């Protein structure tokens, strides 16, 4: 039974204590299955430690050392992977924090710019409303004044028409009175001398010739 179970494995596998322990357990179970009808039970099979040629022993030892070194390196690699993952996670968290901070700053700047735009629009609307109100007030003032002047001019025109009609109804005496009041007083400022005829006749041709000379 032991030979059959141990024959399932290579010499490298048999060199592993775990392997020949498992082979011994399977051999005990198979043997008990056959001995059970006879009322017998095997409780323990102490297997001998396998022995090989010295070169095989050396190769097995070197193989075991190499496998142990591989396990050590694998463990180190796993630790490095864990450390790398931890550092990557830490960097991601730091970058995410920086990103969130930058995003918050950009959002604050955006809100500030939006508030400035709203304030500028309000200022422009206020200026437009004020200028529009001032323009309407100025226009209303001019319209009111024009209407008042129109009324005054109409009244003056009516008065002038009435005066002209009154003058026309009074006849030529009014014109004589106006001349006496306004023209005669100005005649005092006019001086004139009487016209004297020349003693000798004048040659007009001679005068025309003198005027034509340069």
Image (tube, helix red, strand yellow):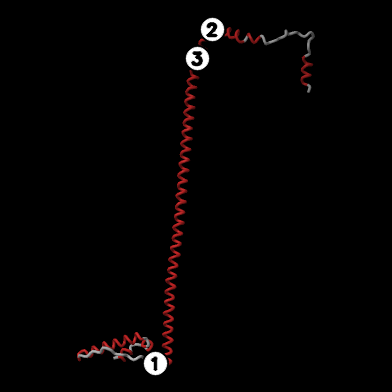
Determine the CA span between mark 1 and mark 3: 152 Å
Residue 138, x across and y down, in percent? 49, 30
Element on which disc 1 rests: loop
Check residue 171 in the rendering and tell me which mark sits there, or answer none. 2
Q: Which residue is mark 1?
A: 52
Q: Provide residue 134's location: percent of width, then percent of height.
A: 48, 32
Q: Looking at the rendering, in which quadrant would you find the N terminus?
A: bottom left
The percent coordinates of residue 48 (x first, y second) are 34, 91
* Foreground tag (1 vs 3): 1
Residue linked to disc 3: 159
Helix, strand or loop status at disc 2:
loop
Q: Residues within 10 Å of mark 1 (few under 14, many from 20)?
A: few
- Disc 2 or 3, which lies upstream in sequence? 3
Q: Nearer the viewer, mark 2 or mark 1?
A: 1
Q: Earlier in the sequence, mark 1 or mark 3?
A: 1
Measure the C-alpha gap from mark 2 to mark 3: 19 Å
Instruction: Report the residue at 43% width, 73% height from top.
Output: 79
Q: Quadrant of residue 44?
A: bottom left
Asked if the residues shown at circle 1 and circle 3 are in contact, with their CB atoms under 8 angstroms apart, the answer is no
- Position of residue 143 measured from the top left corner of the image (x, y, whole percent): 47, 26
Foreground label between 2 and 3:
3
Position of residue 48 in the picture relative to residue 128 (left or right): left
Query: Residue placed at 71% from the left, 9% from the top?
Result: 192
Q: Nearer the viewer, residue 58 or 190?
A: 58
């Amino acid at each position: 039974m032991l030979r059959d179970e141990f024959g399932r494995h290579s010499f490298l596998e048999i060199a592993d204590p775990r392997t020949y322990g498992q082979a011994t357990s399977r051999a005990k179970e198979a043997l008990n299955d056959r001995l059970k009808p006879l009322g017998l039970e095997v409780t323990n099979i102490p297997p001998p430690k396998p022995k090989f040629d010295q070169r095989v022993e050396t190769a097995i030892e070197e193989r075991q050392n190499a496998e142990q070194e591989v396990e050590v390196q694998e463990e180190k690699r796993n630790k490095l992977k864990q450390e790398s993952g931890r550092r990557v996670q830490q960097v991601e968290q730091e970058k995410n924090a920086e990103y969130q901070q930058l995003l918050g700053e950009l959002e604050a700047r955006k809100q500030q710019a939006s508030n400035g735009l709203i304030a500028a629009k309000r200022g422009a609307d206020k200026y437009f409303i004020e200028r529009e109100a001032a323009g309407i007030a100025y226009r209303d003032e001019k319209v009111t004044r024009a209407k008042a002047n129109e009324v005054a001019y109409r009244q003056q025109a009516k008065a002038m028409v009435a005066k002209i009609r009154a003058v026309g109804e009074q006849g030529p005496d009014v014109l004589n009175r106006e001349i006496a009041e306004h023209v005669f007083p100005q005649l005092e400022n006019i001086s004139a001398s009487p016209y004297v005829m020349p003693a000798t006749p004048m040659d007009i041709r001679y005068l025309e010739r003198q005027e034509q000379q340069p």
